[in-house]
Image (cartoon, grey):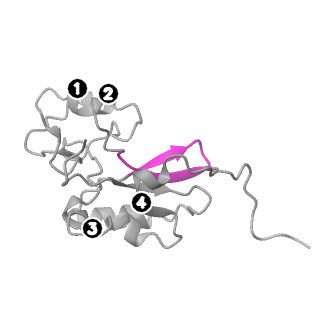
Amino acid sequence: MTSPNVVTKRIVLDLDRCTGCRACGAACHVGHHDQTNLVPGKVADVALLPVHCRHCAQPACAAACPTGALYTDEYGFVRRSELLCIGCRSCALACPFGVIPDEFVRHVAPKCDLCVDRVVEGGIPRCVAACTAGALSFVDLEETVGTPEYVGGRIQSRSTLRRA
């Protein structure tokens, strides 16, 4: 049973809508005072996609952190204390989803916090608000479980410009 304060919404990416414009990363950078917590995930040499922390119920990254810099707050978000982070990269190695990159900024692990300052007041994360393609949505986890949808159903992309 979860606490009434726990936020059960998460960010979902529709691969077929993402254009790779990186407006989500720009919004994250500006909203977090020139530190980008949203990192692009590179799919071979084909695309850059936003990679979000899944805010696990039992986060391996927090368990691996020797200083306690990563912790789960009262809302269920896995957060980072910049003052405690020593840049050891244990969290990046422990994360099974690869959402914490090896390249740290100012010796601190860049990690998505789901814009907790906005979400606890009923808003949506900055990246979702900035996504002009509608590829990012902020939905309740209960609604997405068991939904028979194809994620990344596009197998091959084609240019929109074609010769006659």
Q: Earlier in the sequence, mark 4 or mark 3?
A: 3
Q: Amino acid at mark 1?
A: Ala
Q: Position of residue 32 (x, y in %)?
A: 22, 62
Q: Residue at x 33, y 27 (%)?
A: 93
For discs 4 and 3, the disc positioned in front in the rendered view: 4
Magenta region, residue range:
39-53
Q: Is residue 56 magenta?
A: no
For the residues bearing labels 3 and 1, Cβ distance under 8 angstroms: no
- 72 or 8, which is in the foreground? 8
Q: Earlier in the sequence, mark 3 or mark 1?
A: 3
Q: Which residue is mark 1?
A: 64
- 122 or 18, which is in the foreground? 122
Q: Which residue is mark 3?
A: 30
The Cα–Cα distance between marks 4 and 2, rounded to whole angstroms, is 26 Å
Q: Amino acid at mark 4?
A: Val
Q: Residue at x 50, y 65 (%)?
A: 21
- 156 or 42, which is in the foreground? 156
Q: Is residue 144 above or below residue 23?
A: above
- Side (left or right) of 69 relative to 147: left
Q: Which residue is mark 4?
A: 139
Q: Residue at x 26, y 60 (%)?
A: 115
For the residues bearing labels 1 and 2, Cβ distance under 8 angstroms: yes
Q: Which residue is mark 2?
A: 94
